């Protein structure tokens, strides 16, 4: 099953894994207005799609995403329909939601990053739960080069992953760094010479687990970062009580004891 959004993004689903492909290879998947709309539409489409247990996000051609399409700078009217301070998508504005939608999806999202990943592209990849990156990929927190600051959710998504002084240096200087350095700095999870294959394999592993448990674990990871100790402990207990003795929890035990593949019910 494959669906296309604005000739910019394709979504295909196989064996409980959705592959979201930024599909503007001739422009290194640079972000124009149509790409923004397509990414938001793809994320919203996946939110209600039954049977999807994991998502892989990647770019067609020789790069993941080169960041904002530079021709957009010539459009003085590109944000006139709404102020950036308007919260159009929950707690986010439209550009921020392009990156944060992946963190908000109920199922885990894995980004497979190769080639160039600059500016907004880096922030979109950062919206994924896990990032697999080519060791020689080229990354940059690019916005200061254009007299701007990162404003697509990067500061939220990097918090807790990237050391503060490292992020400051990379932001102030917009210097490039490699995929290997991205792992060292906290922008990426693993380096691999075939990031898409590794991301797909990991997605299949996740898809083989109880989808209710995995979704609950992602929800816990999203919610507990800003809770106090008592809140975290209570959130654990509430989440666990909802899972205990549920059909998929019972099936996890039975399958594990019988050493067979589980047969789960999807949310």
Image: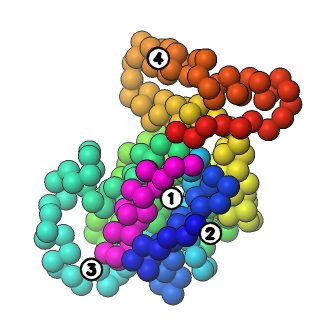
Q: Secondary structure at mark 4?
A: helix
Q: Which residue is mark 1?
A: 125
Of the numbered discs 4 and 3, the one sitting upstream in the chain is 3
User: For the residues marked 2 and 4, what is the alpha-carbon distance in whole angstroms?
Assistant: 39 Å
Q: Residue 133: where, in percent of width, then height?
A: 64, 60
In terms of secondary structure, where does tag 2 sit? Answer: loop
Marks 4 and 2: in contact by CB < 8 Å? no
Compared across the picture, whether 184 is left or right of 150 comes to right
Residue placed under numbered mark 2 in the picture: 114
Which color mode does the image show?
rainbow
Image: 170 above or below 257: below
Which residue is nearer to you in this view: 213 or 197?
213
User: In the depicted view, which residue is nearer to us: 109 or 253?
Assistant: 253
Q: Quadrant of residue 83?
A: bottom left
- Magenta segment: does it hold 152? no
Residue highlighted by disc 3: 73
Residue 238's tag is: 4
Magenta-highlighted residues: 32-51
């Amino acid at each position: 099953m494959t669906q296309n959004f604005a000739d910019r993004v394709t979504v295909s689903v196989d064996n409980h894994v959705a592959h979201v492909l930024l599909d503007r290879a001739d422009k290194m998947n640079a972000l124009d207005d149509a790409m923004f709309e397509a990414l938001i539409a793809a994320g919203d489409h996946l939110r209600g799609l039954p049977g999807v247990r994991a998502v892989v996000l990647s770019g067609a051609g020789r790069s993941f995403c080169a960041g904002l399409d530079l021709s957009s700078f010539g459009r003085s009217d590109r944000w006139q329909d709404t102020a950036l301070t308007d919260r159009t998508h929950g707690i986010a504005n439209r550009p921020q939601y392009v990156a944060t939608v992946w963190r908000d999806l109920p199922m885990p999202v894995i980004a497979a990053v190769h080639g160039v990943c600059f500016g907004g592209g880096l922030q979109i990849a950062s919206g994924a739960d896990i990032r697999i990156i080519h060791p020689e990929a080229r990354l940059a927190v690019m916005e200061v080069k254009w007299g701007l600051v990162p404003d697509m959710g990067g500061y939220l998504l990097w918090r807790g992953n990237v050391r503060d002084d490292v992020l400051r240096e990379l932001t102030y200087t917009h210097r490039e760094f490699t995929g290997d350095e991205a792992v060292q700095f906290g922008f990426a999870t693993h380096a691999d010479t075939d990031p898409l294959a590794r991301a797909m394999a990991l997605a299949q592993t996740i898809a083989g687990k109880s989808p209710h448990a995995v979704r609950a674990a992602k929800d816990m990871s999203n919610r507990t970062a800003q809770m106090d100790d008592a809140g975290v402990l209570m959130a654990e207990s509430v989440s666990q009580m909802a899972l205990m003795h549920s059909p998929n929890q019972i099936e996890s035990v039975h399958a594990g004891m019988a050493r067979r593949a589980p047969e789960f019910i999807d949310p």
